[in-house]
Image (tube, helix red, strand yellow):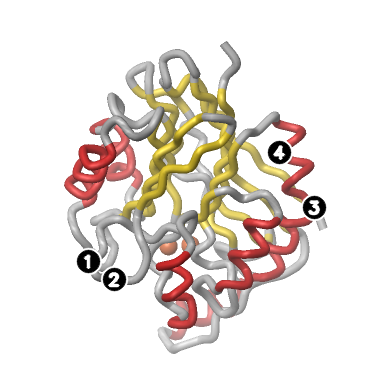
Amino acid sequence: MKPFNILALGDICGPEATKFLCKRLWSIRRQYGVSMVVANAENCAEPNGIDKDSAISLFESGVDVITTGNHVYRKSSVFSYLDDEKNLLRPLNFPSSNPGHGSVITKIDGVRVLCMNVLGDAYMDPSGCPFEAVEKELDRQEGNYDFALLDIHAEATGEKKAIAYNFSDRISVCFGTHTHVQTSDAQVLDGKCAYITDLGMCGAVDSILGVKKEAVIHKMKTKMLSRFDFASGEMCIEGAIFSVNTDTWHGISCKNIRITGE
Ligand SMILES: [Fe+2]
Ligand SMILES: [Fe+2]
């Protein structure tokens, strides 16, 4: 059995991080024997959100599916592209009339992967119930895919783990995004679902969650508005490599990665 390997990348923070990643992604794919790349790019454009040009450069550089989150609608210019580009996802649990879609089935090396994106409930702006939204989508797509993958874009670690455990029978690859801080709890849930609570980020090392530290500190100390610009300098690429057994379609391993450079 040759496993199917997926690289999932944490929130990409800004144009410089996008360029840094795009330059290296094909060689990272080769190095880790990866068949598919999923990246959360809700913050890849200036000053935040995602735009069409950044998404296209990520696709051209080796990203197969882009997921997003609470910042997906920051730029209205991306709305029609969200409708048109099937491999660019917005969270499933927004109103169904919103621009974009929350899932796609991609076929890579003959493997049909159902990719889904959902927003958490805890400490986030209200959206629909993530459990219900994912369950509904799995039911709707039943029989159309070989295995399922889910990006849980959420703040609370416990909520991410609860969602993943709830679907460990039906989802083989499950990871969290949004906090920009990588967790060290990569594991296989119930022997079937390869999981990590947060992938981390692709962004500047000398920063607060990818943003210039001075601006964040100023806002926290003074409670006054402050402009958040992405930091630059040394960059990191954080994420995880997941392996799926192509006989059983179970997730069999998850290993976090971190690559740094100028
Ligand atoms: Fe987010
Ligand atoms: Fe983010």
Disc 2 secondary structure class: loop
Tag 1 and tag 2, C-beta contact below 8 Å: yes
Q: Quadrant of residue 31?
A: top right
| Horizontal arrangement in the rendering, residue 150 relative to residue 139 (left or right) | right
Q: Is 63 above or below relative to 194?
A: below
Spatial CA span between label 2 and label 4:
33 Å
Sequence-wise first label, 3 or 4? 4
* Residue matched to label 2: 98
Spatial CA span between label 4 and label 1:
35 Å
Relative image position of residue 228 (x, y in whole percent): 55, 79
The N terminus is located in which quarter?
top right
| Residue that appears at 53% across and 81% down | 218
* Residue matched to label 1: 95
Spatial CA span between label 1 and label 2:
6 Å
Disc 1 secondary structure class: loop
* Residue matched to label 3: 261
The one nearer the camera, 228 or 137, is 137
Tag 4 and tag 1, C-beta contact below 8 Å: no
Sequence-wise first label, 3 or 1? 1
Spatial CA span between label 3 and label 4:
17 Å
Q: Is 195 above or below relative to 106?
A: above
Amino acid on which disc 1 is placed: Pro
| Horizontal arrangement in the rendering, residue 218 relative to residue 192 (left or right) | right
Sequence-wise first label, 2 or 4? 4
Q: Which mark is residue 29?
A: 4
Amino acid on which disc 4 is placed: Arg
The one nearer the camera, 224 or 6, is 6
Sequence-wise first label, 4 or 1? 4
| Horizontal arrangement in the rendering, residue 255 relative to residue 196 (left or right) | right
Amino acid on which disc 3 is placed: Gly
| Residue that appears at 44% across and 23% down | 251
Label 3 crowd bin: few (<14), some (14–19), many (20+), radius 10 Å: few
